[in-house]
Amino acid sequence: PKAVKAKIINLEPLRDKRVRLSGWVHRLRDQQDIMFIVLRDGTGYLQAILTGNANKTYDALTLEREASVELTGTIKVVPEGQKAPGGHELVVDYWRVLGRAPGAEEAFSNRLNEQSDPSIQADLRHLVMRGETSSSVLRLRAALLTAFRATLATLNCLEVTPPCLVQTQVEGGATLFKLDYYGQPAYLTQSSQLYLETCLASLGDVFSVQESFRAENSHTRRHLSEYTHLEIEVAFVKFEELMDHIETIICETVDKLLADTSASALIKSLNPSFTAPIRPFTRMSYVSAIAWLNEHSILHPAEDAEGNVIKDDDGNVKMVKHQVGDDIAEAAERQMTDIIGRPVFLYGFPAEIKAFYMTKLPRVEGQPEGVHYTESCDLLMPGVGEIVGGSMRIPDMDELIAAYKREGIDPTPYYWYTDQRKYGTCEHGGYGLGVERFLAWMANRYTVRECSLFPRWPNRATP
Ligand code: 4AD
Ligand code: MG
């Protein structure tokens, strides 16, 4: 019978039928009279069996893993107890090589093993991603973005696509990538927040999935120079409701993924002990977090007046107790979430360590004069630390103008942002979630670099 063109994912109804499949040789096992190929076509894996003359040809004798092939044959159910992906296999009666892969075996087994240098892994990212783990992470990433979009649709948030080329900063001038834009300075966007804010009066609550760029010289396992930023902006909310919103988005998205058979299988294979986080998340003020860190003897790197880390003669960083006003560093944050073991909102950071656009928390009695805390929050997850950063935005025009001044920002290029306060301002807030960090948490990856298609970090923009 004539063979039907098929994909591995759709073989169920094609059992005992003759099919034609194209894909790559994922694994190869050659025995005397029989050759086993595990075929990979991007939708799944399938064991194929070649017997008789089929495995005596030149192509068969020189076949290597990663060659692309077309296999034609009959789909057979595999007897219980015999292991085969999908529960069926292909008994091949005709096959041909589409693209040979000389040297692939060497590249994969010698250069790309568990022990290989991270820079080799990075250089060969285009090959690494053919592996089961890497492709599972990328597959889960796609499912995650779909689930986020579905959750946001139920909350009537509309997706928009803000620009990447901008002339305003959001998160501080120090981390901007500057470029020449027809002879004028421009930057790669750090956050789409300001653009999302302009959409509220037009489209209501909005979100975007956009790349953000940070020229941070951070060689950590959770910093990228380019990352995918899910940002959400909501109108007519209070600070508490904003934190509820974050919690809802995260919990409902996780529930959707766990309810989906293929996504939950991916999570299970990558992170067998994963469980959905329990609501409500702990909410801890910045001031209590500083006290908590000191109670747990978690120290802070000492800094001089310019903010440079102080080192001793042996080059070791001098560690001191945390003080109100300190930024909670990555290491401290990580230790904290490891001890607490569940999601934690830290809120109310001092204005000095946060961005210009944030509203102030109402003053608390006994609070020293001149100390200002903001309606800001970071959501920390065990194993990763901060995955979400959000805040309420200053709705008042005069206050916003004062904030530009305090930060030394020239308000001229921000006229469109300021106009939002001029024409029908509203109480509003929003947040940004690092997609790679979220994925690193869900899939239990050591670094966000494994969660990006082609990760960029200081001095790396290849492949
Ligand atoms: O905390 P951030 O800087 O907040 C903002 O950009 C706000 N304007 C977002 C908003 O309110 N719309 O960044 C938000 C999140 C962080 O919590 C983190 O998950 C991620 O973006 N992120 C990074 N991820 C990878 N590499 C980096 N260098 C990142 N910087 C921030
Ligand atoms: Mg942040």
Image: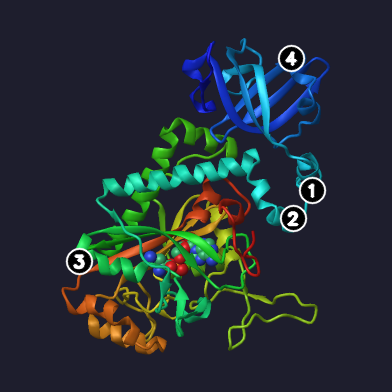
The quadrant of the picture occupied by the N terminus is: top right
Distance from label 3 to label 1 (Cα)?
55 Å
- Can you identify the residue that label 1 sits on? 111
Rate crowding at label 4 as few (under 14), some (14 to 19) or many (20 or more) other CA atoms within 10 Å. some
Question: Label 3's element?
Answer: helix
Residue at image position (24%, 85%) is 398
What distance separates the C-alpha of mark 3 from that of mark 4? 68 Å
Q: Residues within 10 Å of mark 1 (few under 14, many from 20)?
A: some
Judged left or right of residue 83, residue 415 is left
Between the residue at mark 2 and the residue at mark 4, the CA separation in whole angstroms equals 38 Å
Q: What is the C-alpha distance between the residues marked 4 and 1?
A: 32 Å
Residue denoted by label 2:
120
Image coordinates of residue 239 in percent, x first then y, are 30, 64
Q: Amino acid at mark 2?
A: Ile
Residue named by callout 3: 201
From this view, report whether residue 295 is shown above or below residue 84: below
**Callout 2 touching callout 1 (CB < 8 Å):** yes
Crowding around mark 2 (Cα neighbors within 10 Å: few <14, some 14 to 19, many 20+) is few
Q: Quadrant of residue 405?
A: bottom left
**Location of mark 4 (residue):** 51
- Mark 1: amino acid: Arg
